[in-house]
Image: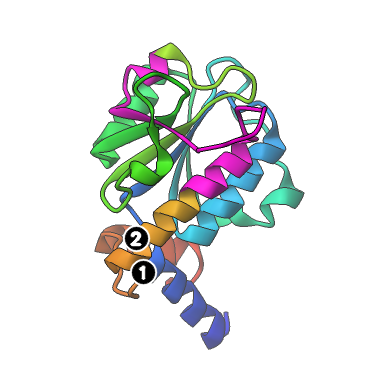
Amino acid sequence: MTPERAERIQKVLSYRQPGLVVVMENVHDPHNISAVMRTCDAVGVQDIFVLMTRTPRHMEYGKNSSSGAKGWLTIHEYDNTAACMHAVKEKCKHIYATHLGVESHSLYELDLTGSVALVFGNEHDGVTEECLSYCTGNFIIPQVGMVKSLNISVACAITLYEAFRQRQIAGSYSGVPQLPEGEQTELSKKWGVLD
């Protein structure tokens, strides 16, 4: 590994956001999953939870649309909602789901600077009631068109870039590592920087 490559990896690690997690529930299109992974890598999300209770686990994610992002992320796969959401709750204080409901808030009203997990549901049915029961709030992305939903990868990108904007203002991307030292060391080894 060249010194330049090692330096770039260390810089990427210094921007990782341990308090920002994405959960995808029953997203059946592997290209959507891969597109979400690419966006997660772009904004410094390290942990992604892929919850598949209706579709087979361990599906092959679309290699083209992820552009290799999968190798830079920590992907947690579950086929049980309770087990998945328990693990998410161990990482994050707040869990917000994209859900069109009476108590939903606009994405732009949320504080995404703290410890937050963002849940995105199935392309057709959205987030299940079971998964919603573990969430601390719901949000919508404001829209003025006839169609009231966005593709999951688009919705996730919009949401993550709002989190990126808020966190950047709050100083979370200052270059001071946010990851715990042990996790940073483990990832450095996995990515080939340390032996």
Per the model, the C-alpha gap separating discs 1 and 2 is: 7 Å
Q: Which residue is more in the foreground, 11 or 58?
A: 11
Estimate how packed mark 1 is, as few (under 14), some (14 to 19) or many (20 or more) residues with alpha carbons within 10 Å. Answer: some
Residue 81: image location, x then y, percent: 41, 19
Task: Determine the residue positioned at 31% across, 22% down.
Answer: 134
Task: Tell which of 176 and 129 is nearer to you.
Answer: 129
The three-letter amino acid code for the residue at tag 1 is Tyr
List the residue tagged with mark 2: 167
Neighbour tally class for label 2: few under 14, some 14-19, many 20 plus, Cα within 10 Å: some
Q: Secondary structure at mark 2?
A: helix
14 drawn magenta: no
| Residue extending farthest front | 144
In the image, what residue type sits under mark 2?
Arg
Is residue 172 visible from the viewing direction of this image? Answer: no
What residue occupies the far right of the structure in this picture?
64
The residue segment tinted magenta is 130-159
Q: Is residue 166 left or right of residue 75?
A: left
Q: Which mark is residue 135?
A: none
The quadrant in which residue 176 appears is bottom left
Report if the CB atoms under discs 1 and 2 are less than 8 Å apart.
Answer: yes
Q: Is residue 153 magenta?
A: yes
What is the x, y in percent for residue 89?
A: 27, 33
- Quarter where residue 31 is shown: top right
Q: Which label is found at residue 173?
A: 1
| Residue 174 place in picture, x, y as percent | 33, 74
Residue drawn at x 53%, y 57% is: 41
Secondary structure of the residue carrying tag 1 is loop
**Sequence-first disc among 1 and 2:** 2
